[in-house]
Amino acid sequence: MNLRRTIRGFLFLLSVTVLSAQMHTTAPAATGTVEGRVLGITRSGDLKPARMPTIYLLYQGRGEHIEEKSADDHYSITSLTALDKRLKERIASAQAGTVEDEDLQCRESLLDTDQSLVDTAQWALDNKKAKQVLMAEGDEEGHFKVSKVPVGHYRLVARGQAGANDAYWESFIVVKAGMATSAKLTSPGKSCLRVE
């Protein structure tokens, strides 16, 4: 009788331990929400909404510093490499006496940003870190919302058009569990007059 009770007790304890372990491993990760608006300021000081901007959240890590091999680390390296390449091209053009077109330089800068974002998204897929690059679309008035964002620090990049300008915006945010993080992007990192 005592042996049966001991075996039952052991099996019960084992089943509780296994169930507890399963609940612990299948528990959802802590997430929050990111919402906000993207606007451009015209030269006259008017605010123009970024119409249907594309929003990118690039994971930096749990702390304030960029973690190695995070999406934002990859984006930073890719962006700096593109900038270095453009600077070398401009130095070579200046030494050759070639006059640079400012509009073309502005467009190239936006293309470098686009390429860095695409490269980072591909890197995340290739390295099974797809959750480190989250994307969303804003509406006609520049409003956006991204749900179920894992807790952590992020670089928020918005890409779109506001008024007559093609631009990108950047901000740094912290996502906390169960909370909404609000972001208002009004100062583009780069803005070029749209050519049609």
Image: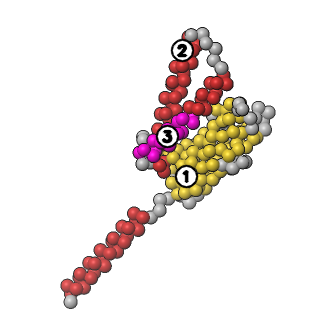
Tell me the amino acid under the disc marked 3: Thr
Q: Amino acid at mark 2?
A: Ala
Mark 2–mark 1 contact, CB under 8 Å?
A: no
Marks 2 and 3: CB-CB under 8 Å?
no
Q: Which residue is mark 1?
A: 175
| Quadrant placement of the N terminus | bottom left
**Horizontal and vertical percent for residue 24?**
40, 65
Residue 140 within the segment the image draws in magenta? no
Q: Amino acid at mark 1?
A: Val
| Mark 2 → mark 3, Cα distance in angstroms | 28 Å
Is 16 located above or below residue 125 in the figure?
below
- Give the residues in magenta: 113-127
Q: Depth check: 3 or 165 in front?
A: 165
Residue drawn where x is 47% and y is 33% of the image: 77
Q: Residue at x 33, y 71 (%)?
A: 17
- Where is residue 37 shown, x and y percent of the image? 68, 47
Front one among 127 and 33: 127
Quarter the C terminus occupies: top right
Residue on which the image places disc 3: 120
The answer to which quarter of the image holds residue 187 is top right
Q: Secondary structure at mark 3?
A: helix
Are there few (<14), some (14-19), or many (20+) residues within 10 Å of tag 2? few
Residue 125 among those drawn in magenta: yes
Residue position for label 2: 92
